[in-house]
Image (cartoon, rainbow, N blue to C red):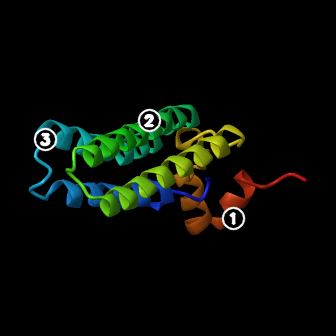
Amino acid sequence: MASVKRFEELICWQEGRKLVNFIYQLTRNRQFSDFSLKDQILRAAVSIISNIAEGFERGTKDEFIYFLYIAKASCGEVHAQLYIALDQRFIDRSGFQKTHQQARRISAMIYKLIESLRGSKYKGLKHKVVEKEDKLETLLRKDFPELHEQLYKKTS
């Protein structure tokens, strides 16, 4: 987790993005005539990647985990809505299976990420210690090396 610097690097986010595209493709056909269901399933799919991104950007492990749980719940919402769409014949069996499998896969990935974070010492980007450059020291080291050595001499 420490090596991930952007949410776009997370595999669960990348796979969630694919799911959003699958859902958009499924709901574009004329058979998908229930506009409320269409809107709800699209919103749920978008919610998955949005919550992964928002949680990551919050900068703390606890908030990230919280938003991952919301993303996982949105996967469940997509599952349920896919069954409704199949039962009402808005989508065919192959579209259902492909999309349902992707949603289940993402849900499992999110769960594994949550478990990994819960067991890690990672605290989040807000807690990352970044050493700030001392501009005076840099200037002295560059332009006045003798003075730098006197002022910043390391004692053993």
- Mark 3–mark 2 Cα distance, whole angstroms, equals 22 Å
| Residue at horizontal 72 percent and vertical 53 percent from the top | 152
**Upstream in the sequence, badge 1 or badge 3?**
3
Amino acid carrying label 2: it is Ala
Q: Which residue is mark 2?
A: 73
| Residue at horizontal 22 percent and vertical 58 percent from the top | 26
**Upstream in the sequence, badge 3 or badge 2?**
3
Q: Nearer the viewer, mark 3 or mark 2?
A: 3
- How far across and how far down the image is residue 136, in percent? 55, 52
Q: Which residue is mark 3?
A: 34
Residue at disc 2, secondary structure: helix
| Residue at horizontal 59 percent and vertical 47 percent from the top | 113
Classify 10 Å Cα crowding around label 1: few (below 14), some (14-19), many (20 and above): few
**In the image, 97: left or right of 107?**
left
Q: Which residue is mark 1?
A: 146
| Residue at horizontal 52 percent and vertical 53 percent from the top | 135
**Upstream in the sequence, badge 2 or badge 1?**
2
Q: Using the image as rendered, state which of residue 39 and residue 98 is in the foreground.
A: 98
Amino acid carrying label 3: it is Asp
